[in-house]
Image: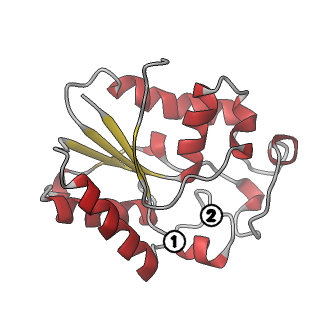
Amino acid sequence: MSIYFLRHGKSQANLDKVFAGQKNDSPITDAGINQVKIASNELRGIRIDRIYASRLKRARQTADIVAEAIGFDKNKIEYDDRIQEYDMGSFTNTPIRMINADELVPVNGVEDPVAFRDRVFSFIKDHQSSNENILIVSHDGVSRIIEATKLDLKPNQFFSLPSHPNAQVVKLDLSWL
């Protein structure tokens, strides 16, 4: 079947224009709630058999809103740490700005990009041959590492790709795997 990706709705960290990573567990904003409700309308026409979400608050809230809107039992949402956001280390809570791979990788406490790619693709590989329609509710870094891998970029270059919009449903094309 298919795997769909949904980045969480606009979060407080997005509004504050700071890097959130894993350590800023900000909720989604009222605007984010509205974004997710709009995205849910698009998902109503798709049978979603399973929802997997990051444990971070912004993704959990997004998954709950979607589940309610499409008639999916919220108690059946599954949480998987492999699809949590990239750990920004000491960049967490600093103003968002364009950064390149050489600037990001040596930051104190930052997650190793190869380990990040490996954990995300461990999840993807576990589900790529599923006979079910799966919705992943996750984060921008996760969508970027998937795209960087598809483009055959080095893992540390994932952050140089454009951001994935909040609350936009994307059907993942994994035929390249």
Q: Position of residue 172 (x, y in %)?
A: 41, 35
Residue under label 1, please give it.
Answer: 11
Q: Amino acid at mark 2?
A: Ala
Can you tell which mark lies on residue 20?
2
Q: Is residue 47 left or right of 144 when viewed as pictured?
A: left
Q: Is residue 156 left or right of 33 when viewed as pictured?
A: right
User: Quadrant of the image for the N terminus?
Assistant: top left
Kindly report which numbered mark, 1 or 2, lies closer to the viewer in this rendering.
Answer: 1
**Residue drawn at (49%, 18%) of the image:** 176
Examine the rendered structure and indicate whether residue 145 appears above or below residue 169. above
SS category of the residue bearing label 2: loop
Q: Picture quarter containing residue 147?
A: top right
Tell me which colouring the rendered structure shows: secondary structure
**Residue drawn at (59%, 32%) of the image:** 117
Can you tell which mark lies on residue 124?
none
Crowd band around label 2 with a 10 angstrom C-alpha radius: few (<14), some (14–19), many (20+): many
SS category of the residue bearing label 1: loop
Q: Position of residue 102 (x, y in %)?
A: 87, 41
Q: Identify which residue, 113 or 47, lies in the foreground.
A: 47
Task: Tell me the distance, in whole angstroms, between the alpha carbons under discs 1 and 2.
Answer: 9 Å
**Residue drawn at (60%, 37%) of the image:** 145
Q: Which of pointers 1 and 2 lies earlier in the amino acid sequence? A: 1
Q: Picture quarter containing residue 60?
A: bottom left
